[in-house]
Image (tube, grey):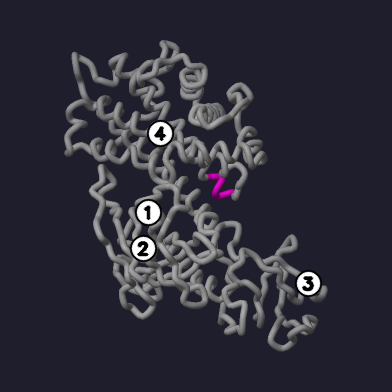
Amino acid sequence: TERQGGSDVRANEMLAKPLSNGEVELQGEKWFCSAPMCDAFLVLAQAPDGLTCFLVPRVLDDGTRNPLRVQRLKDKLGNRSNASAEIELAETWEPRLTASVYEPALRPAGEKPGALAGMALTERQGGSDVRANEMLAKPLSNGEVELHGEKWFCSAPMCDAFLVLAQAAGGLSCYLAPRLLPDGSRNHFHIQRLKDKLGNRSNASAEIELAGAWGRLVGEEGRGVPTIAEMINHTRLDCLLGSTALMRRAVAEATHHAAHRSAFGKLLAEQPLMQNVLADLCVEAEAATATAMRIARSYDEEDAAFRRLATAVGKYWLCKVAPGVVGEALECIGGNGYVEESVLPRLYREAPLNSIWEGSGNVNALDVLRVIRKEPEALERFLAELEPEFRPELADVNEFGARRLVESLALALQGSLLALHAPPEIADAFANTRLRRDKGRAYGTLTESAHAAVILDRHRPRLD
């Protein structure tokens, strides 16, 4: 509806200027837009042939925002939480959280061109079992609450706002708690202690207390876990990409070192056994890269069925193998790789972390089981990506064998991707050693048939 017509939509004045193939440019104003936080809207507008209905998305296919502007939220008698609170929250935070600008100053969100968000989900008594959380959300009005309690892990406490899980009257719910209130005063967000972590030290983690901190409801009350689920999946993607990057960096360091370091009359890269070790690491790193990029593409393409299973599989496996790859790369460099002047110690301390974040190995393996049992379309979509030769046996799936199952799915996906996209030397070496099991349990146990020198030459950094 529009201001001048109300229920008489035939009086609408919004214009649809034709582009091509049923696409148009819409120009005009609507007096009532129901639930403006939605992903798309049905819009009536005047086309050359008369009043016509169009579907208008908030985000275009290329990921940019459609020029749809909210001018004012209606101050309604009731049904306020349906739109007002959520759209106000979205209009304040989404443009800043998705901006490419880093703004380090501690200022209210409305005064910043860019902002960062952290998480405060887990508590001392529950860990990954967030349903055991005890933090309370005391209602104020219109989706606003006071948050009372402690969080055992708050990721990145230097951020501008945090997603917080707390118990409300309707059950566990998700809230956004900013560090600064809209008036510029500090929220009741208290850092009790910074964690003394093994690695990842430049990205702080903290124990915090929220002593009556102001927060806003995100999603529906009582559906905190489903609300954060999509965010968790994106963060799992981030974890598997991070582990892939760690492996690639470690392999690059090792292969570069071997190409320039001589021992016993030859460059290390020319020593047959060192070639075997390095080539094995190169195969692992390339398989990880192909897998991570394929899973990332499923997010770009909104391939929900594939990414639902592939994210958990990839997160489990890539994060699991990273510490071994980094450790072996460190050994290739030798004593120089073990001193802090080298980057390898930092990579080595970082390597185990992604397997812990956003669900440990067991949590991800059990998630894979749930998807297989409850979402057959996700399993079907995943299996469609696999070469028939590599498809694993899925009979008698149970918790005790969950890790073995996920590993077999991950290796099958990696082998299939390399068969499509990698040179034959890489694809064959992977299939023979990881899928046909013609390999020992340590790196450096490729067979004579592997083209180690070719693989190594493909992966070592070029400085010219």
Describe residue 89's horizontal placement relative to residue 119 as left or right.
Answer: right
Query: Of the residues shown, which amino acid type is indicated by label 1?
Result: Glu
The disc label shown at residue 149, or none? 2
Q: Which residues are magenta?
A: 297-301
Identified at 21% across, 31% down, the residue is 337
State the separation of the CA atoms marked 3 and 1.
53 Å
The quadrant the C terminus occupies is top left
Q: Nearer the viewer, residue 142 or 445?
A: 142
State the separation of the CA atoms marked 2 and 1.
9 Å
Query: Of the residues shown, which amino acid type is indicated by label 2?
Result: Gly
Q: Position of residue 19 (x, y in %)?
A: 70, 66
User: Is there any visible trace of residue 416 in the rendered image?
Assistant: yes
State the separation of the CA atoms marked 3 and 4.
54 Å
Circle 4 Cα neighbour tier, 10 Å, few/some/many (<14 / 14–19 / ≥20): many
Q: Earlier in the sequence, mark 3 or mark 2?
A: 3
| Residue that numbered label 4 is attached to | 320
Q: Position of residue 308 (x, y in %)?
A: 57, 44
Identified at 50% across, 59% down, the residue is 172
Q: Position of residue 430 (x, y in %)?
A: 47, 23
| Residue that numbered label 1 is attached to | 123
By secondary structure, the bulk of the magenta-drawn segment is best described as helix
| Residue that numbered label 3 is attached to | 52
